[in-house]
Image: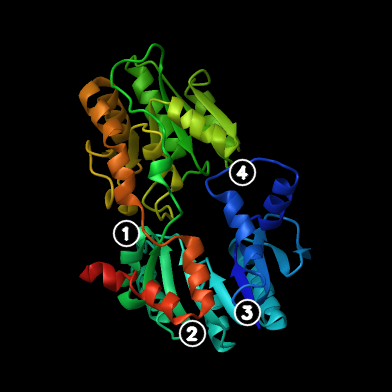
Amino acid sequence: MKKVLFIPLHFFRSTYESFARGEPETYAFQRKIVAFPGSLVGTVGIAEVCVVSFTESDAYDMVLEPGLRTLGIAYLRDDGRRKSLDKVLAFIDAYKPTHAIIQCPESDLLRHCIRRRIRMITAFADSFSGKSLIGRLRLRGFGELLNNTYIEMVSNHNLPASRVLQGLGVHPDKIVPWDWPWDPAACDYSFKQGGRPAGPWKFFFAGRVTREKGVGDLIDAVRLLRDKGCSLSVAFAGAGDIECFQQQVRRFQLTDAVQFLGTIGHDEVLRRMRDADAVVVPSRVTASEGIPCVIYESYLVRTPLVVSDHPMFRAVVRDRVNGMLFQAGNAASLAKKLAELMKDAQVYSTLSAQSDKALRALIAPVTWFELIRRWLSDDPADKAWLQAHTLSAVNNG
């Protein structure tokens, strides 16, 4: 019988319990993600599933339902990282899983599982940017590690991030781009017309409120536009370094123009995204990105998209065709693009009208759920289906 290990699904227990209390999901497909590990128990020879979750403080080891176990390990950054990882490795030795789905690009974890002859796939959402020579050499070594036969399939979020893995030396016939199960046919939003809104222009951000995500750059861009007499506001949805950025807002005297919403329900995110005049994704190039859900969702609700030229974004977004591109980390460049969008009604209308086509072109055919389920089945037909969706097949298609 199979024992399956997920490493990690962040905040798994707390989210599982919040849904049991009837609380809403806070990002797309969160409810399906949390339900998925338990749904595998009793299928295709799976006796038990365990989810390892990195937490910010509390540690736990508990059974949530028959066959579904979860382990919480407090993740310590920097000097404490090794201590946290050692706890995970010790648990693996005690638990003795037969299969593992690895979602963090941690070389020591992968090597440990290889030594224990655990069958694995990866399901990353990472752009793997190595700026220094040492960083690039380490990434090249990581690519070689991913070719190990015990890592049976290497998956990354969507096509651009998967091509990065090929660039690291991973064989394209074992790379499978994955995605979430977006359904463009379920969209019932109308397209938006350009032109000056009745009140201030409203911009919206959803994600981790951090420097790497470009939050400070967006605040600085608002300051630049306000100094030029533009009437606008921005709302940030998400958790993170909010107090730090509130200080920046106060320093720039933008308290009437910048709002931090904290973590809000996913339905509320979509409502605010639809109500906004533009959705902004200002990630810096150093941010670890696949393709954020907010890009898909801006297309879904037909609200024009303004994104940085992060390598993962510029692979799918064409300036003034399906979004507005600005130089990552450059507040002046961002302010210029926002000003262009506000002034050019034709471009605005085009971006909204192209959103349906843009969404359909963006979606990868293999979902995270189907990737894992078909790999665990060991059915030759499922293996053949996955092989037909490898990067090698895409490159030759």
Q: Which mark is residue 150?
A: 2
Q: Residue at x 71, y 79 (%)?
A: 95
| Front position among marks 4 and 2 | 4
Front in this rendered view, residue 310 or 41: 41
- Residue 357 lies, in percent from the top left, at 28, 42
Q: Amino acid at mark 4?
A: Glu
Which residue is tagged 4? Answer: 25
- Residue 146 lies, in percent from the top left, at 42, 78
Decide if residue 277 is in sight here.
yes
In three-dimensional space, the C-alpha distance between marks 1 and 3, rounded to whole angstroms, equals 34 Å
User: Which is more N-terminal, label 3 or label 4?
Assistant: 4
Q: Residue at x 33, y 54 (%)?
A: 312
In three-dimensional space, the C-alpha distance between marks 4 and 3, rounded to whole angstroms, equals 30 Å
- Residue 389 lies, in percent from the top left, at 34, 69
What kind of element bears circle 2? loop
Q: Amino acid at mark 3?
A: Gly
Q: Amino acid at mark 2?
A: Tyr
| 168 left or right of 32 in image | left
- Number of residues whose C-alpha sits closer than 10 Å to that of mark 3, classed few (under 14), some (14–19) or many (20 or more): some
Which residue is tagged 1? Answer: 160
Front in this rendered view, residue 192 or 116: 192
| Front position among marks 1 and 4 | 4
Circles 1 and 4: CB atoms closer than 8 Å: no
Circles 2 and 1: CB atoms closer than 8 Å: no
Q: Residue at x 28, y 35 (%)?
A: 333
Residue 74 picture quarter: bottom right
User: Which is more N-terminal, label 1 or label 2?
Assistant: 2
Q: Colour scheme in the image? A: rainbow
